[in-house]
Image (tube, helix red, strand yellow):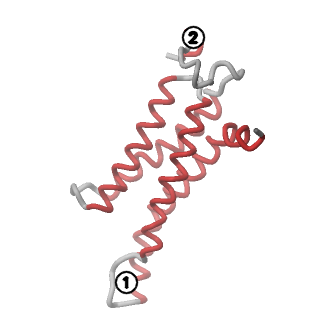
Amino acid sequence: MIAKSLRQTNSDIIGAFASSLCLIHCLATPFVFIAHAGAAACCADAPSWWKGIDLLFIGVSFFAVYWSTKNSSKPWMVNALWASWIGLCLVIGNEKLHLLALPESLIYVPAIALVVLHLYNKKYCQCDDDQCCTSKNKTYSNENRGY
């Protein structure tokens, strides 16, 4: 019960932290390419473990968004968090599969959105009691809508 409470109350902090690390990872990738290409003249690709970190960020951010949306008092915040997470998945998936020619900088949009949304949710969208955030009670009262 305590672990569940900690997950729910800290999910926005974990989400903002993971999204910030994802952003740093995305910013550092070009430098890793340059350093790796200089160290090993045969290859101009990042190490596979570096590329695999993307999947770790997707996993951590999924659980952070999941628990944050369970505790959010505003329906628009729930939608915005999930839309940003899906956007992050689509951009990273496209990067791995090379489906569309998208600019590399597009990854920053959902990563920054997740950081900002998690911080905003932590400050302004938390439930005052256990009743407003239960999955059974998804009908939001007019004062909790925040529109």
Image-based side of 82 in relation to 63, left or right? left
Above or below, 54 relative to 128: below
Query: In this figure, what is the number of numbered marks?
Result: 2
* Disc on res. 37: 1
Q: Amino acid at mark 2?
A: Ser
| Viewer-closest of 48 and 112 | 48
Above or below, 76 relative to 64: above
The nearer-to-camera label among 2 and 1 is 2
Residue 27: percent from left, percent from top: 45, 62
Residue 73: percent from left, percent from top: 59, 23
> Badge 2: few (under 14), some or many (20 or more) residues near its Cα, within 10 Å?
few
Outermost left residue: 100
- Residue, disc 2: 141
Which numbered disc flags the more N-terminal residue, 2 or 1? 1
Quadrant position of residue 101? bottom left
| Residue at image location 40% in from the left, 48% down from the top | 88
